[in-house]
Image: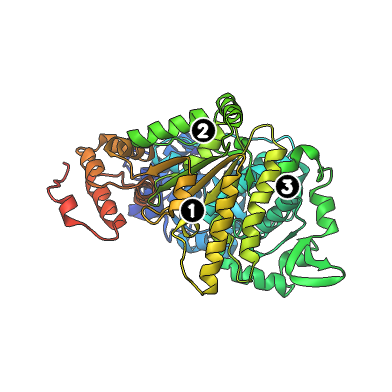
Amino acid sequence: MQNSQKRLRPVVKDPYLLPLETEPANIIDAMNTIVSHSENTGFTENLLFYLQKPIHYLCEKLQINEKQAVLLSVICELGSDTNVSISMLSEHFGCSNLNSLTFIKELDELVKKRLISKPSNNTYTTKCEVLNAFSNNEVYAHKAIKFATCEELLCAIETLSYEYDRGISIMDFHDAIQIMLDDNMHLEFAKKLQSYDLNRNDQAILICACILLCCHEQCTFDLSDLRRYVDRRHNGTIWHELTSQTHELIFLELVEPSCDNGMEDDEVFELTKKAKTEFLSGVALLSEDSMFKKIKDFIHYKSIVPKDLYFDATVKEQFNRLCNFLQKESYAEIHDRLVQNGMRTGFACLFYGSPGTGKTEAALQLARMTERGIYQVNMASVRSKWVGESEKNVKGIFSQYRSIVSHSEVAPILLLNEADALLGNRFTNTNKSVEKMENTMQNIILEEMERLNGILIATTNLTESLDSAFERRFLFKLRFNNPDANARLHIWESMIPEITSITNHKQIVEHYPFSGGQIENIARKCKIECILNGKAPDFDMLKTFCDEENLVKERSRVAGFRNAS
């Protein structure tokens, strides 16, 4: 840094190459200045001289050198929604691809500092948490999470996969995986995986196969297993390459088609002996202590990420009461008293309400707060096109849950997620096979609820068509409404802290009765706007994004707004 400040002024023939005098206001301002003035400049010494004020601002703020400051700024601009290749950098600076190869050393230093990530060979991107820090004019400080064993690392990645399944971007998901691997290079698994230099999707396939084997004792995988790990836009291509045996992992002899009684199945795959030896050497695949890790869709309560829940007063009171009932000591006492009085001991709970109101997240946090595992089943995946298979799947869910309960000191929660179709009114006087199947599945669930020994939570968007037989069997029924104004204010302020400085921001809160999921969408749009254009959210921006979030704009709802000045 001191050497760069002592640089002699170069001999400049072009009068416009006098140093830029404007002092940057913050990190984003400095980056915007660098990006706007570096295009087609050839990345020369004259450029570094001309932009010395914004460059030196970033150097001192982020503890990086001048070239790294320029490269980081351009990657933050270009890499907000894609991976940035060396050729993209050379195109921006207007220099040859050969000259741009000199960037690699500086880029790799930025990767080591955790300011950018390297999804594949010679492509780079920005990380969401880094951009968030920059947008707040803060220095990003990475907090490493280290695991003692390969199994712990794989379980943490599996937990992360549920976030992707619930809506985070594939880029953020793969970035988070890479960070976990980088933080745990002391583990042979991470070290060996890194040595193959696979692209993000291929790395995720390999990780998925290892998770299934180590955590669930599932030796094979198919396309449905990969959906939580790979970019869904590339599912078709990935599966074609696997089934046609042209995939990179097959060439590397890490994955192969599964064999059953000597017959090769080109729709099911497994890790090769080579892969198991290299990646899972020393892993106790049959450990009794990890029994529940073998069960697909079982989540240990310690793996659930804590999140703040904001509900209106009624829902909050009901949720807290249910949470108190399910605490270990309270639940055990209630269970024993019910047995003594000859009553059913099962706790069946219905969480219902509009999408995005936090039903599934509430169930997960309830499991975490009461220190119970949660066996999560998406009911939409239970149906099968084969006769009798759907009914068999429903029975299998409850059979598996009974087995879990029998081996648990503390009863876990069975979460039937998105159970809308199975909780509606049953069909009467029907001859249609599909409707008969629906009725049979509903009858199985009703019978299982009658003899339930444990805790069941079903989530649904249904508000009116709940079958009366189900209504009787749910001991607790929590309606999740869109949050009231007070709860919405907390959600807005937690997701967009800057909103408190906006005049009349409470008008936004009061006039748009959004769910938490809708507010999160708006918060993400604001963050993107800030990252790309350096614009902090203001009243007009929030109002525009709120109007866009409404599929049908209700003019009366926004009447009377006045711009904040």
Which of marks 3 and 1 precedes in the sequence? 1
Amino acid, disc 2: Gln
What element does badge 2 sit on? Answer: helix
Provide residue 217's location: percent of width, then percent of height.
Answer: 76, 50
What element does badge 1 sit on? Answer: loop
> Is there CB contact under 8 Å for labels 3 and 2?
no
Q: Which residue is mark 1?
A: 167
Provide residue 461's location: percent of width, then percent of height.
Answer: 41, 53
Provide residue 42's location: percent of width, then percent of height.
Answer: 47, 59
Q: Quadrant of residue 480?
A: top left
Total tally of numbered discs in the picture: 3
Could you tell me how far apart the alpha carbons at marks 2 and 1 are, in whole angstroms? 46 Å
Q: Which mark is residue 538?
A: none
Q: Is residue 103 visible?
A: no
The foreground one among 411 and 194 is: 411
> Is there CB contact under 8 Å for labels 1 and 3?
no
| Residue at 54% in and 58% down | 442
Left or right: 55 with respect to 563? Answer: right
Q: Which residue is mark 2?
A: 2
> Is there CB contact under 8 Å for labels 2 and 1?
no
Q: Quadrant of residue 183?
A: top right
Provide residue 236's location: percent of width, then percent of height.
Answer: 60, 71
Which of marks 2 and 3 precedes in the sequence? 2
Left or right: 565 with respect to 88? Answer: left
What element does badge 3 sit on? Answer: helix
The foreground one among 36 and 293 is: 293
